[in-house]
Amino acid sequence: MKDVQNFLKDFQKEMNWEITDKNYQESRSSMLNNYMLLTTEVGEVAEEFRSIFTRTSELAEENNISEEQAFKLAKNMHKENVGKELSDCIAYIMKFANYLEIDLNESFYSKMKEVKMRRNKDAG
């Protein structure tokens, strides 16, 4: 994760896509704009999932196959696009982390440890 975060820090600087740090108002505007772009990318992931489900139904009906078989085919058909959209999401998330100087590698593993230590409230 550190490699990706460092790559994106340099990439975003090279592309002039960094969150501005000139003053509060410009930083605020830049952060909100990038947040909006992130949520747009999350929406595009949802659209790909919707396409997988729609295509599953179509494939099952057109080819007279089970939903399970059709679902496997549909997932494979959309795998590349889902990967691209998830990558866009990662890029925006890491942009925020870089702006705020957060080590996502450290933060991620710390959070997963915290989650693991929680008492499972759903268990009987």
Image (spheres, grey):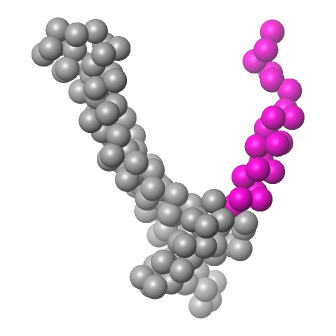
Q: Position of residue 5 (x, y in %)?
A: 60, 67
Q: Does residue 71 sit above or below 7 in this rendering?
A: above
Q: Is residue 89 visible?
A: yes
Residue 93, quarter of picture: bottom right
* Left or right for 111, reference 94: right
Which residue does the image show at 17% across and 8% down from the upper left? 64
Q: Position of residue 32 (x, y in %)?
A: 52, 68
* Left or right for 10, reference 76: right
* Left or right for 33, reference 51: right
Give the number of callouts. Answer: 0
Q: Position of residue 58 (x, y in %)?
A: 19, 21
The prevailing secondary structure element of the residues shown in magenta is helix
Q: Position of residue 11 (x, y in %)?
A: 48, 77
Q: Does residue 36 sit above or below 70 in this rendering?
A: below
In the image as oriented, which residue stretches furthest toward the bottom? Answer: 22
Q: Over which residues does the magenta segment extend?
A: 104-124
Viewer-closest of 85 and 63:
63
Q: Is residue 31 visible?
A: no
Which residue does the image show at 37% across and 53% down from the upper left? 84
Q: Does residue 40 sit above or below 116 in this rendering?
A: below
Which residue does the image show at 57% across and 65% down from the upper left? 4
Q: Quadrant of the C terminus?
A: top right
**Would residue 118 be counted in the magenta stretch?**
yes
Q: Quadrant of the N terminus?
A: bottom right
Q: Does residue 29 sit above or below 22 in this rendering?
A: above
